[in-house]
Image (cartoon, rainbow, N blue to C red):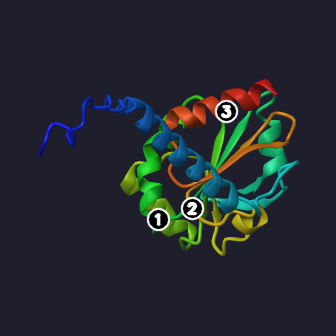
């Protein structure tokens, strides 16, 4: 190779953007996809005033949503839909137990058998939440939930403020309950 054909000056190499920018962009894309999927999944859920329902508590006494909410004046309330066969429900159980100490909540045990077997299961697992039986999933259908676990947060004025399905953190639920209480 002669001197004439050799490049006389090398062009400076373009500096690659910092790695953190790429990670931030990937995280933003992932988060946007997750939010879009959650919105699509919850497209048929109830909005506006919480649908009224009556059910049977595990001890056999009647439960009426309006009466229960009236006993919690000025507070946001949580309806927790779950099933005994749901593995994700088991992972959220600790979050629900912690919330039950500070916030009014009722669990709705959906498609999980009769009250006696649910009582035994709850005792075995150490669940001490107030619960009602939704043997055929009728309440879950009324709220338009596509599956369990499902969380419905109702503001003090009776409006549904937040709905989510799948794993939800204790902190996330606490923040949503707090926010719904402020509305």
Left or right, residue 44 beside residue 18? right
> Which comes sooner in the sequence, label 3 or label 2?
2
- Which residue shows up at 36% across the image and 32% down it? 14
The label on residue 177 is 3
Which secondary structure, mark 1?
loop
The label on residue 148 is 2
- The answer to whether the residues at label 2 and label 1 have Cβ atoms under 8 Å apart is yes
Left or right, residue 64 beside residue 37? right
Which secondary structure, mark 3?
helix
- Residue nearest the observer in this picture, 73 or 142: 142
Image quadrant of residue 10? top left
- Using the image, determine if residue 19 lies above or below residue 59: above
- The answer to whether the residues at label 3 and label 2 have Cβ atoms under 8 Å apart is no
Q: Position of residue 112 (x, y in %)?
A: 54, 70
Q: Position of residue 59 (x, y in %)?
A: 61, 57
- Using the image, determine if residue 74 lies above or below residue 65: above
> Which comes sooner in the sequence, label 2 or label 1?
1
The label on residue 86 is 1
Crowding at dot 3, Cα within 10 Å, few <14 / some 14-19 / many 20+, comes out as: many
Image quadrant of residue 90? bottom left
Label 1 – label 3 distance at C-alpha: 24 Å
Left or right, residue 5 beside residue 106? left
């Amino acid at each position: 190779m002669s001197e004439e054909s050799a490049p006389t000056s090398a062009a400076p190499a373009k500096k690659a953007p910092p790695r953190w920018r790429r990670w931030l962009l990937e995280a933003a894309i992932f988060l946007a996809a997750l939010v879009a999927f959650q919105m699509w999944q919850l497209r048929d859920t109830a909005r506006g005033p919480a649908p009224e329902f009556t059910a049977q508590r595990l001890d056999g006494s009647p439960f009426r949503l309006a009466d229960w909410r009236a006993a919690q004046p000025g507070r946001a309330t949580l309806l927790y839909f779950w099933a005994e066969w749901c593995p994700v429900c088991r992972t959220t159980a600790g979050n629900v137990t912690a919330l039950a100490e500070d916030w009014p909540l009722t669990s709705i045990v959906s498609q999980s058998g009769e009250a006696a077997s649910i009582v035994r299961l709850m005792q075995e697992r150490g669940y001490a939440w107030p619960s009602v039986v939704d043997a055929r999933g009728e309440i879950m259908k009324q709220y338009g939930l596509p599956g369990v676990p499902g969380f419905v947060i109702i503001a003090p004025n009776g409006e549904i403020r937040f709905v989510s399905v799948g794993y939800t953190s204790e902190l996330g639920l606490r923040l949503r309950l707090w926010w719904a209480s402020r509305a």
